[in-house]
Amino acid sequence: MIVVFGSTGNVGRHVVTGLVAAGERVRAFTRDPARARFDESVEVVAGDLRDPGTVLAALTGADGVYVATSPDALAHELAVAAALRRSGAGRVVKLSSVAANAPVTDSYGAAHAAAENAFMDSGAEWTVLRPAGYMSNVLQWRSSITSQGRVYQPYGKVRRAVIDPEDVAAVAVACLTTAGHHGKAYQLTGPEALTAPQQTARVSVALGRPLEFVDVDPEQARNGMIRAGMPPELVDGLLSSMADPGPLRGGTPQSTVRQITGRPPATFDSWLARHLTELHG
Ligand SMILES: NC(=O)c1ccc[n+]([C@@H]2O[C@H](COP(=O)([O-])OP(=O)(O)OC[C@H]3O[C@@H](n4cnc5c(N)ncnc54)[C@H](OP(=O)(O)O)[C@@H]3O)[C@@H](O)[C@H]2O)c1
């Protein structure tokens, strides 16, 4: 039995599908089972990562665990690691970020690194996945694309080898179902490094309408994210990660997805073709 925390997330929902396809028994943990849409073989359990009792109960009989949660929720992950120490589940895959690659330079990476350490000390066979930015982050542009034909983002010159969340999930499934991944921290990227203006140009072609990229001043972006309700410390960490063009932060394509899954990572154009309707107003 493999328990999936973050089962409804960008990556987690594909982890559930992939594990089912691999013939695994899956227990999907969510705060709202009514909204979860999974194969009928999946055991959906209601729980909250802020409630350690529900976490421990979900681990009953588990021999594998996948963990992802909201980016500002270190306490959630520490709770799962603590429950794992008590329950003794076999394998754990923790979804982390390239921001956790050493040297860690911001609060976002530091929180992921602290969670990674907790799983490394949990007694389980651990693997951590450190993906670059998701291709699906482009969906956050939908509203300004629809209303203004514009994309607003800071650090437009920074190239990022963005990754399809389904590829991250495919790696997670391989790590949970095959041997040889214990003690590994995998840096995961897509196949090409693109700037946000380049992504905007591809979206423009796919949608068949002109789009303008606006390189937002980072301070303005910071204020907007805080106004939208994000914790200031998380905002500062995320912006600092976004500003870093180096290979350690996902600026250079890696071969890890192909090595682990046996197939190349999806291109941005392929992701776009599959998600175009979600970008239409
Ligand atoms: N976006 C990026 O570009 C990017 C890149 C690299 C790494 N990451 C990392 O990816 C992780 C997020 O993964 P994701 O994008 O797959 O997830 P997501 O789409 O952000 O969804 C969050 C998941 O966490 C669950 N969750 C949140 N609070 C919970 C709570 N109190 N109790 C139970 N479940 C809770 C949600 O479940 P329910 O709502 O169903 O309860 C949902 O399944 C973060 O750690 C982020 O730092 C993101």
Image (cartoon, rainbow, N blue to C red):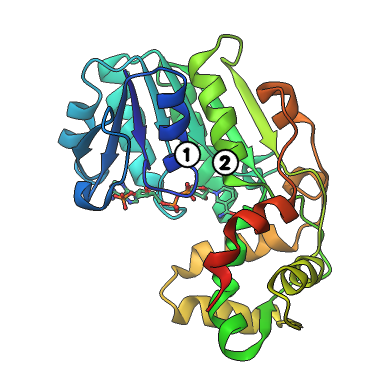
Residue in the picture at 44% in, 23% down: 92
In-front residue for pair 122/193: 193
Q: Secondary structure at mark 2?
A: helix
Q: Amino acid at mark 1?
A: His
Residue in the picture at 52% in, 76% down: 225
The reply to whether callout 2 and callout 1 are in contact (CB within 8 Å) is yes
In-front residue for pair 140/47: 140
The x and y percentages for residue 104 are 66, 45
Judge whether 276 appears above or below 265 on screen: below
Residue in the picture at 22% in, 28% down: 58
| Distance (Cα) linking label 2 and label 1 | 6 Å
Judge whether 127 appears above or below 221 on screen: above
The x and y percentages for residue 260 are 68, 22
Q: Which mark is residue 271?
A: none
Q: Amino acid at mark 2?
A: Glu
Task: Give the residue pinned by disc 1.
Answer: 14
Q: Secondary structure at mark 1?
A: helix
- Which is more N-terminal, label 1 or label 2? 1
Label 1 beta carbon within 8 A of ligand 1: no
The x and y percentages for residue 21 are 45, 24
The x and y percentages for residue 37 are 31, 46
Task: Give the residue pinned by disc 2.
Answer: 166
